[in-house]
């Protein structure tokens, strides 16, 4: 029997937008390398995105830098007009100029320009959750977040989030207005952001862990999903795959964590969503992290 994403329970973003606690990261549905250009098999991309919704996923994470713009346009092609319960989050603060080539731009003018482009691609009059993709070292995070809240007041954005931040930047951002989410790299393969997860848990802020299966530029593939990796034995004992165990651990780590694994495969998508039905005890959570 196919497990629905709702098996993971639900969470409210900004205390308002209720979504299943297992989302989908759409980044890989772009041209490669470097997330540049349109996804080459548009119909397959549409099929995957529609399957995402069929599986009960109610949050899709994209960014204008994915493409740029092509990923947002594919989401719209597949799902517009959107289901009433679907939350789409996108990001500003990055200017993409070539395959894997981008620069940070958190100036208020640039944030507004990217947001307007995102609205056009997504075919929407507002964005549910707008996240600052990276902190621009030439623009104080307070200024960038303040500009995003100007867009909230104009009705073009409902909630503001931040991404790739330090703990100090997290605290500074909150002085400029309410923060509904944080998106940082986090997994059993990289617990560097433990303090930010704890801060989000205490504040009731949603934490999106990207790279949930341990993938990054220095470790191609998804090491935590390997059948011969560190989770293989424990996964066998739980009668699940290593990838499912890695996602289940995130769900158990904090009630404010909302994993957003991405894939271009329907099979892996269904495998990831099935992790919503796996339960870990507190001792298992501690043992796996150790």
Image (spheres, helix red, strand yellow):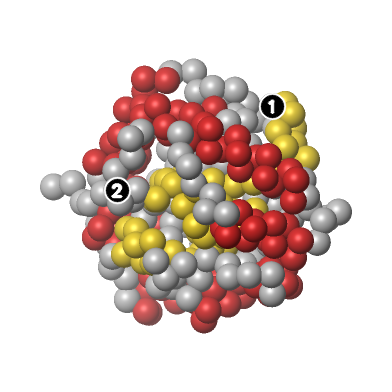
Label 2 sits on residue: 84
Residue 25, image x, y percentages: 46, 44
Q: Is residue 113 visible?
A: yes
Q: Residues within 10 Å of mark 2 (few under 14, many from 20)?
A: few
176 lies above or below 225: below
Residue 161, image x, y percentages: 58, 60
Q: Earlier in the sequence, mark 2 or mark 1?
A: 2
Q: Residues within 10 Å of mark 1 (few under 14, many from 20)?
A: some
Q: Is residue 184 visible?
A: no
Could you say whether the residue bearing mark 1 is in a helix, strand or loop? loop
Q: Residue furthest front?
A: 154
227 lies above or below 200: above
Q: In the rendered structure, are the residues bearing label 2 and label 1 in contact, judged by CB atoms less than 8 Å apart?
A: no
Could you say whether the residue bearing mark 2 is in a helix, strand or loop? loop
Q: Which mark is residue 265?
A: none
Query: Mark 2, mark 1: which one is toward the viewer?
Result: 2
Label 1 sits on residue: 99
Decide which of 286, 147 is in the foreground and name it: 147
Name the residue at 74% across, 65% down. 142
């Amino acid at each position: 029997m196919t497990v629905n994403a709702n098996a993971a329970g639900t969470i409210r973003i900004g205390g308002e937008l209720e979504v299943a606690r297992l989302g989908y990261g759409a980044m890989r549905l772009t041209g490669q390398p470097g997330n540049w250009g349109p996804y080459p098999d548009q119909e397959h991309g549409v099929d995957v995105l529609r399957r995402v919704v069929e599986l009960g996923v109610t949050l899709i994470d994209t960014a204008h830098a994915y493409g740029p713009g092509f990923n947002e346009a594919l989401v719209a092609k597949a799902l517009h007009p959107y289901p009433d319960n679907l939350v789409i989050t996108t990001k500003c603060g990055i200017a993409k100029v070539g395959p894997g080539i981008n620069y940070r731009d958190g100036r208020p003018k640039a944030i507004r320009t990217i947001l307007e482009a995102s609205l056009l691609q997504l075919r929407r009059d507002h964005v549910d959750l707008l996240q600052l993709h990276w902190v621009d070292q030439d623009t104080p995070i307070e200024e960038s977040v303040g500009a995003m809240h100007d867009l909230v007041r104009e009705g073009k954005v409902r909630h503001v989030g931040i991404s790739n931040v330090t703990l100090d930047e997290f605290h500074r951002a909150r002085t400029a207005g309410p923060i509904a989410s944080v998106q940082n790299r986090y997994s059993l393969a990289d617990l560097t952001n433990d303090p930010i997860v704890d801060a989000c848990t205490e504040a009731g802020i949603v934490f999106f862990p990207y790279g949930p299966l341990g993938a990054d530029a220095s470790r191609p593939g998804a090491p935590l999903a390997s059948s011969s990796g560190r989770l293989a034995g424990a996964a066998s004992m739980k009668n699940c795959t290593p990838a499912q165990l890695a996602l289940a651990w995130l769900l158990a780590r904090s009630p404010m964590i909302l994993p957003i694994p991405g894939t271009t495969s329907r099979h892996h998508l269904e495998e990831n969503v099935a992790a919503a039905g796996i339960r870990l005890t507190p001792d298992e959570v501690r043992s796996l992290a150790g």
